[in-house]
Image (cartoon, rainbow, N blue to C red):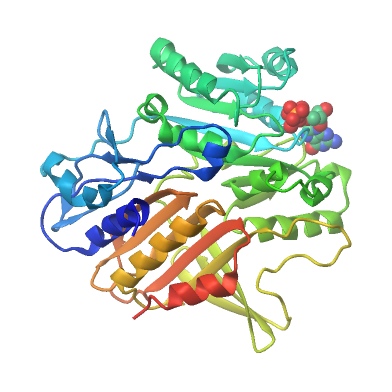
Amino acid sequence: MSAMSTDLVTAFVGLATRTPVSRTLRTHLLPSLLGHRRGYRAPSLSVSRPVEVIGGFSREMCGLSRRMKRPFRRFATATGGKGAVEEEEDCDMLTKIPPDDRIPATIITGFLGSGKTTLLNHILTAEHGKRIAVIENEFGEVDIDGSLVAAQTTGAEDIVMLNNGCLCCTVRGDLVRMIAELVDKKKGKFDHIVIETTGLANPAPIIQTFYAEDQVFNDVKLDGVVTLVDAKHADIHLDEVKPQGIVNEAVEQIAYADRIIVNKTDLVREPQIASLIQRIKSINGMAHLKQTEYGKVDLDYVLGIGGFDLERDLPWLTLRSSWEGYLRLFVWSHGKFFRITANKQVEHHAHDHSHDHTHDPAVSSVSIVCEGSLDLNKANMWLGTLLLERSDDIYRMKGLLSVEGMDERFVFQGVHDIFQGSPDRPWGLDEPRINKIVFIGKNLDAQTLEKGFKACLL
Ligand SMILES: Nc1nc2c(ncn2[C@@H]2O[C@H](COP(=O)(O)OP(=O)(O)OP(=O)(O)O)[C@@H](O)[C@H]2O)c(=O)[nH]1
C-alpha cells in the first residue's frame, strides 16, 4: 500500500490501539493533484504534538483544532507510514494541550456579484466588538471593492488589497506573506481575519493554504467558508458547462461552504428560490443555509462558526436512498434520530430534474447513516484506498463513526487529501451507535460508497 494510505491507516488504527501511552497528533496533508495542476506545492506532511491522555486513550489523534503553542511539523517521507508509532518518541505524555489561541479566519466566497462585499460591509458595520482585518482579493489593478469597503466602514482594523491575480492561483504566496505580515505587525490589534475572494475563486487551494503553509498554520486557523449565492443568477453559473478539466467555480464555491447565503431573494419569486435551494442541497447537503437580502444575517451565523473544528458535532445530516419506491429521509439532529418517510420515488443523487437547464450533475453530496460498529482494519483499508484513488474528486467529507472496541465516537473530516480525525466524547450508555458520514464531491457513486462503507461493519 502506498505511503498515503498507509499513513491514513496507521493513524486510524492507532486510535483503537488501546495502549496507555501518549499518542501523537497527526494530520495528513497529502499532495493534491489539484494543487499540482495549478503549480502549487502541497507537500505530504504530518503534524505531531503531544496530546492529553485520558483514561489511557488519546483524546485527539489527528486534530488541528487544539494545539501546542508552536506546532511541530515535519514532512513525511515516502515510506512514512509508520509515522504514528515513530513519532511517539516526540510526545510528552504529561503535557496538556493549551487552548487554540490562533486567530480565526473566515473566507467569504461566492460567484461574481453575489453580494460578498455587501456582506463584508454588513459584518464590518455591525455591532460585535470584534476587530477585523480584511484581505480583499480582486482581479485587475483598480481596486474597486477595497474602496467600497473602506468608504463604508469604520470597523476594519486593516484592509489589505490583493489585486494582481486570483487568490486561488497566482497570488497564494502573497496571501501567505500578507497574513504573516499582519500577524507580525498587528498581532493583538485584531481578533478575526476576513478574506473576500474574487468571484471566480476556487476555494480549495485557499483552504489548503491554512494547512499547508507553516507561516499561516502556526498563527491562524480557518474558521469557516461562507458562500454567497445570487438567487437570481446562480442557475446560469451552475449550468455552465466548462471545458474538460476546468472546474465550475460556482459549483465549487457551494461544495466547500460551511455556510451558504442565498442572497438577492428580493429579485426572484418563491418557486425559483425553492428550486435553487433544492439544487444547492444536492451539491452540499452539509452546510447551513439562509436566505437574505443584502447579506443581512446574524453575525454569529458567519463568524466564530468553527467549521473546521473536529470537536463540533455534525450539525445535521440527511440520507436519501430509494427503498421500495419510498423516500426515506433520515435526519440526525442534536443526538436524536428521526426517520421520515415520504411517498415519493427519487434517485440516489436527488438531482433536481424539474427544469430544462443543462447543468453539471457531477458534484453532489452522498450521506450514509447506519447503526453498527466498524471493523477497524476494514474501515482503514476502505478509507485509505478511497482517498488514494478519489481524493481529487472528494472535495469534503465529514463523519462520526462507531468503531468496535472503542468507547468514544470517532469524528473525522477531510478536504480532498487532508484528513483529520480524533475520538471525541464517549458513546452514551443507551445511545444507539449510529455512524454518519457525508461526502461532497464529483462523480460520487452513492451506491458504491454505501456498499463499501457497509462492508466494513461487523
Ligand atoms: N437587489 C439586490 N441587490 C443586491 C443585494 N445584495 C447585493 N446587491 C447589489 O448587488 C451588487 C453586487 O454586490 P457586491 O456586494 O458588490 O457583490 P460581490 O459579490 O462583492 O461582487 P464581485 O466583487 O464583483 O464579485 C451591488 O450593487 C449590491 O448593492 C440584494 O440582496 N438585493
Which residue is at 65% across, 28% downward?
A: 120
Q: Quadrant of residue 45?
A: top left
Please say whether residue 291 is visible from this viewpoint.
no
Which residue is at 53% across, 19% downward?
A: 174
The quadrant of the image that shows the C terminus is bottom left
Residue situated furthest top in the rendering: 185
Choose between 299 and 193: the one closer to the eye. Answer: 193
Residue 388 placement (x, y as % from top left): 44, 56
Left or right, 79 with respect to 439, comes to left
Which residue is at 43% across, 12% downward?
A: 186
Q: Is residue 455 above or below residue 130?
A: below
Residue 437 placement (x, y as % from top left): 48, 64
Q: Quadrant of residue 424?
A: bottom left
Left or right, 152 with respect to 401, comes to right
Quadrant of the picture in which ligand 1 is shown: top right
Q: Quadrant of residue 11?
A: bottom left
Residue 124 placement (x, y as % from top left): 62, 23
Please say whether residue 68 is visible from this viewpoint.
yes
